[in-house]
Image: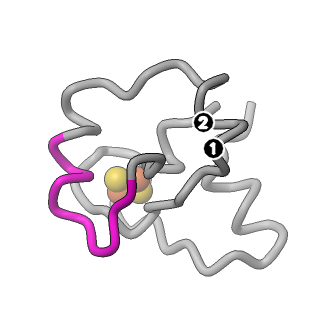
Amino acid sequence: GQRLLEVGQNIGMPLEGTCEGQMACSTCHVIVAAEWFDRLAGAADDEEDMLDLAAGVTRTSRLSCQIV
Ligand code: FES
């Protein structure tokens, strides 16, 4: 299946995904709508650590390469 990263790229969202899902960048950062955020499986510690380094992070930020 596709990850949200690829789905977003396919519809023209400006997601780079430089590390291709290795959680070594944060160029796939997305802010998830609150009503959807709670439906997602929680972020792993590695994802949280990388999000801490991303610009403009919010309470509902995720790395789109980690959302399937
Ligand atoms: Fe690099 Fe998601 S593509 S962390």
In the rendered image, which residue does mark 2 sit on?
A: 37
Q: Quadrant of residue 22?
A: top left
Which amino acid, mark 1? Ala
Query: Looking at the picture, how far across and down is residue 58, in whole percent?
Result: 38, 58
Which residue appears at 53% of the width and 19% of the height? Answer: 41
Residue 34's tag is: 1
Is 55 placed above or below 20 here?
below
Residue stretch in magenta: 49-58
Q: Position of residue 23 (x, y in %)?
A: 28, 46
> Which amino acid, mark 2?
Phe
The residue positioned 48% from the left and 37% from the top of the image is 66
- Of 46 and 56, nearer the camera is 56
Considering every residue shown, the one lying at the far right of the view is 11
- Please tell me whether residue 53 belongs to the stretch shown in magenta: yes
Report if the CB atoms under discs 1 and 2 are less than 8 Å apart.
yes
Q: Is residue 11 above or below residue 53?
A: below
Q: Which mark is residue 21?
A: none
Which secondary structure, mark 2? helix
Magenta stretch secondary structure, dominant:
loop
Q: Position of residue 50 (x, y in %)?
A: 20, 50
Assign a secondary structure to mark 1: helix
Q: CA distance from mark 1 to mark 2?
A: 5 Å
Residue 26 belongs to magenta span: no
Q: Is residue 61 left or right of residue 40?
A: left
Q: Nearer the viewer, residue 68 or 57?
A: 57
